[in-house]
Image: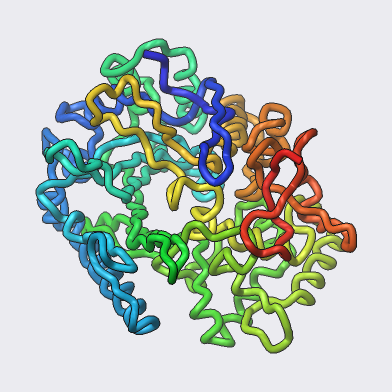
């Protein structure tokens, strides 16, 4: 079986115009199916969800038992409220719309009974190194993420076992008071995986032994749970276009109460509240357009204060390529003097001029359109709408199939794959004691620091890449001057909106 611990440098999906292309290399994500199976199992070295939440347990548990744990009660209750709210809003906004569970409905709602069913459980489907997020909390050296996929167990074998929901258990890479482990140690351990030849249970054991990349993972490291659920599916019909809605939530672990508490999503700007509360909207505009915060937004390292954030995100896919299709943060820009919004073109132009006068060298935001797009893709919902597999960036590996060693399913999205070079460069800098560059490009296009390795692929400028459509009558938008196509390809319109400047690279 070929080694599955890898930095997948060049990979994209045959999905929405992406070509299937892959090259393997040393990496920061564990996708070996048999190793994941061993780690999910009922051993004292396992890191299945049950063992992480309740270390005394020696075996996986089904979701009826999982959600009976006191720590999980707030998550169960919050999901109940979200389902009720989604149902109410759809019935109110479109009274003639039939919404329910299963075929025959115009809007097919996810069966929430599956969340707490004795016939489902969350299965470990991947482990992702996010030491590149050390800028959020330097003392913890970033994060390690255990990705679990909601899965049916048993059954007749004819029904697909994997359900459209992931649960992301986010761990601090280290505890701040643990002086015996440094960020350099963590970076070195993960990068050392490139030289490992083991697979399956042998690989799992080596990663968990002292000095292994997963040796420090334990329940005490838990920071939060992030959930992503396809709450509804709208099949294409004469009345409606195809659409799926993805609900995203975050629950931080409160060690004092031993409960997961519903929390604001990082950078998920609460558009509705900012528009409803004029004073709050003005405060947010003044805060964001200061030169320092604008520079952090440009770099992709901005952390928006919680007072401006929402506790849920509803992302729709597909969204098209027009700015109006990406919500909600594009909706903060006013298109005219009478339109709704927090920012207008003059606000952004003035802020850009002040930033330039102050010596800020902005790399991504160089126009109002670049500002709007960046404001969208720093959010949970906006990011998951861009180059995802449906509404997911890491659907993970399905090792519960009969022959997991032959799994060929792509475990992650083009956005995830295109970001691996940047992430690895950060981990290498930490290992070598150098200053890390935590900046990132747009979610649509990887940063140019990886342009040589990605050139000619759909992750950057090859067939299916996101690009900027030039208009002979207009100057090229400065935010998107590098969004070109490789030789022999042209940036062409996608969707029905001919006014959109964002397209995809196809054969001329």
Q: Position of residue 397 (x, y in %)?
A: 35, 33
Q: Residue at x 52, y 86 (%)?
A: 276
Q: For this rendering, which residue is in front, 461 or 207?
A: 461
Q: Is residue 482 left or right of residue 25?
A: right
Q: Position of residue 102 (x, y in %)?
A: 23, 60
In the figure, 23 relative to 481: above or below?
Answer: above
Q: Residue at x 46, y 45 (%)?
A: 389
Q: How is the image coloured?
A: rainbow
Of the 4 image quadrants, the one containing the C terminus is top right
Q: Is residue 478 left or right of residue 281?
A: right
Could you say which quadrant of the image residue 78 lies in?
bottom left
Q: Is residue 343 left or right of residue 94?
A: right
Q: For this rendering, which residue is in front, 284 or 408?
A: 408
Q: For this rendering, which residue is in front, 323 or 343?
A: 323
Q: Residue at x 70, y 69 (%)?
A: 289
Do we see residue 362 in this rendering?
no
Could you say which quadrant of the image residue 103 lies in?
bottom left
Q: Residue at x 22, y 25 (%)?
A: 402
Do we see residue 143 in this rendering?
yes
Looking at the image, the residue that sits furthest to the front is 238
Q: Position of residue 420 (x, y in %)?
A: 56, 34
């Amino acid at each position: 079986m070929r080694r599955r611990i890898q930095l997948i440098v060049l990979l994209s999906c045959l999905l929405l115009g992406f070509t299937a292309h892959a090259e393997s290399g040393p990496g920061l994500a564990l996708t070996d199916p048999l190793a994941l199976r061993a780690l999910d199992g009922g051993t004292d070295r396992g890191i299945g969800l049950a063992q992480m939440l309740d270390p005394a347990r020696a075996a996986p548990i089904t979701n009826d038992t999982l959600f009976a744990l006191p720590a999980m009660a707030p998550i169960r209750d919050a999901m109940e409220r979200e389902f009720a709210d989604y149902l109410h809003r759809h019935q109110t906004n479109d009274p003639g719309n039939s919404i329910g569970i299963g075929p025959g409905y115009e809007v097919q709602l996810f069966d929430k009974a599956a969340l707490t069913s004795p016939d489902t459980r969350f299965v470990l489907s991947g482990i992702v190194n996010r030491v590149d997020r050390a800028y959020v909390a330097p003392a913890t050296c970033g994060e390690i993420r255990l990705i679990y996929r909601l899965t049916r167990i048993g059954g007749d074998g004819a029904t697909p076992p994997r359900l459209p929901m992931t649960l992301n258990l986010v761990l601090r890479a280290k505890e701040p008071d643990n002086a015996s482990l440094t960020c350099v140690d963590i970076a070195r351990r993960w990068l050392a995986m490139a030289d490992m030849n083991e697979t399956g249970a042998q690989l799992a054991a080596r990663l968990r032994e002292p000095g292994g990349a997963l040796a420090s993972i334990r329940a005490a490291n838990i920071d939060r749970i992030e959930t992503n659920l396809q709450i509804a599916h709208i099949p294409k019909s004469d009345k409606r276009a195809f659409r799926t809605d993805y609900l995203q939530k975050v629950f931080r672990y409160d060690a004092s109460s031993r409960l997961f508490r519903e929390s604001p999503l990082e950078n998920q700007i609460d558009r509705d509240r900012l528009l409803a509360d004029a004073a709050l909207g003005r405060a947010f505009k003044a805060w964001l357009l200061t030169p320092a915060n604008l520079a952090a937004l440009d770099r992709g390292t901005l952390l928006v204060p919680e007072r401006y954030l929402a506790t849920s995100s509803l992302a729709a896919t597909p969204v098209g390529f027009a700015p109006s299709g990406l919500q909600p943060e594009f909706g903060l820009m006013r298109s005219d003097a009478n339109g709704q919004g927090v920012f207008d073109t003059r606000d952004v132009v003035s802020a850009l001029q002040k930033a330039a006068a102050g010596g800020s060298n902005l790399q991504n935001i160089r126009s109002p359109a670049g500002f709007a797009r960046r404001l969208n893709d720093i959010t949970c919902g906006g990011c998951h709408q861009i180059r995802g597999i449906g509404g997911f960036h890491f659907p993970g590996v399905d090792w519960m199939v009969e022959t997991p060693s032959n799994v060929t399913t792509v475990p992650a999205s083009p956005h995830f794959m295109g970001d691996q070079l940047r992430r690895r460069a950060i981990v290498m800098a930490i290992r070598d004691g150098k200053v890390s560059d935590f900046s990132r490009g747009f979610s649509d296009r990887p940063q140019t620091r990886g342009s040589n390795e990605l050139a000619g692929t759909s992750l950057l400028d090859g067939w299916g890449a996101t690009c900027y459509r030039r208009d002979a009558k207009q100057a090229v938008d400065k935010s998107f001057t590098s969004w070109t196509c490789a030789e022999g390809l042209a940036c062409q319109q996608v969707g029905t909106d001919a006014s959109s400047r964002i397209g995809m690279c196809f054969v001329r």
